[in-house]
Amino acid sequence: MANGYMPRKDAEALSWFKAFSLGLAERAGVYPVSPGEIAAIGQAVERFAAAFAVAWNGSTRTTVAVTLKDEARRVAEDMCRPIYARIRLDKSVDDADKLAIGVRPMKASYGRLTAPDTVPLLSQGALTWSAYEIAYRTQHGVTGRAKPVGAAQLQVFRAVGETPARSVEQAAYFRSVSRSPMRVEYTSADNGKVATYFARWVTRRGEVGPWSAPLSVQAVSSGVILSDGLREAA
């Protein structure tokens, strides 16, 4: 890690993640974080802890285990980073409360970044029998790939079920991407399941914009069926 606040070593990073996650859960009303975000962070930290335990144990440590541990840590970092930045920039949160969960307070001379005010537009990209792509563009874009000024990434949440999700509260963090389209692989185990995506722009300091409209995707043996009406893809 080179971000200056998450420790580089896995064991120390895990301790930081746990303290951050537990602090948010125990004092949810103090920080500008939703219950869904707190739950998603907790799940990501638990997955990293489990993967770390396997990779750390000499009897179970394999190349695959280390790869899974590294991926679990990346997801935990991606989940915590924008929340950390949001709390750090929020002047309504006391410095003592920030320090209690490992957040370094901002200096008085620092300014607050403005979050993008545009809504990401999600659409179908290319598809194959084992994967599909979700393309995105800014609300006011022309080429379809430009992000709005100030946005570093697209933060994506996903809900998987028998029917399309209609609210982002039903979804959990999926991944953050900086290039369109986003490739999503699926297997026969996903056949018939509906994945609904919600997305929003996020700045380098964690400021977020408004949520996109949902885009629902159903994987089927012959391809995918997409969008609000789950129309068949060409």
Image: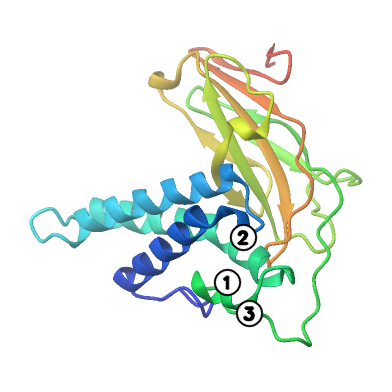
Q: Which mark is residue 30?
A: 2
Report the quarter where the C terminus lies.
Answer: top right
Residue 128: x %, y % from top left: 54, 25
Asked where in the image residue 116 lies, by quadrant, the reply is bottom right
- Residue name at image x 55 percent, y 39 percent: 172
Q: Are marks 2 and 1 in contact (CB under 8 Å)?
A: yes
Residue 215: x %, y % from top left: 69, 27
Q: Which residue is denoted by mark 3 in the rendering?
A: 105
Q: CA distance from mark 3 to mark 1?
A: 9 Å
Q: Residues within 10 Å of mark 1 (few under 14, many from 20)?
A: some
Q: Earlier in the sequence, mark 2 or mark 1?
A: 2
Q: CA distance from mark 3 to mark 2?
A: 15 Å
Residue type at tag 3: Pro
Residue 220: x %, y % from top left: 52, 14
Residue 27: x %, y % from top left: 53, 57
Residue type at tag 2: Val
Q: Which residue is denoted by mark 1 in the rendering?
A: 97
Give whichever of 28, 157 is nearer the camera.
Answer: 28
Label 3 residue SS: loop
Residue type at tag 1: Asp
In the image, taking residue 137 as reference, residue 131 lies left or right, namely left
- Residue located farthest toward the left when viewing the structure as drawn: 59
Can residue 6 be seen at all in this image of the molecule?
yes
In the image, taking residue 53 as reference, residue 77 lies left or right, namely right
**Front of the two marks 3 and 1:** 1
Label 1 residue SS: helix
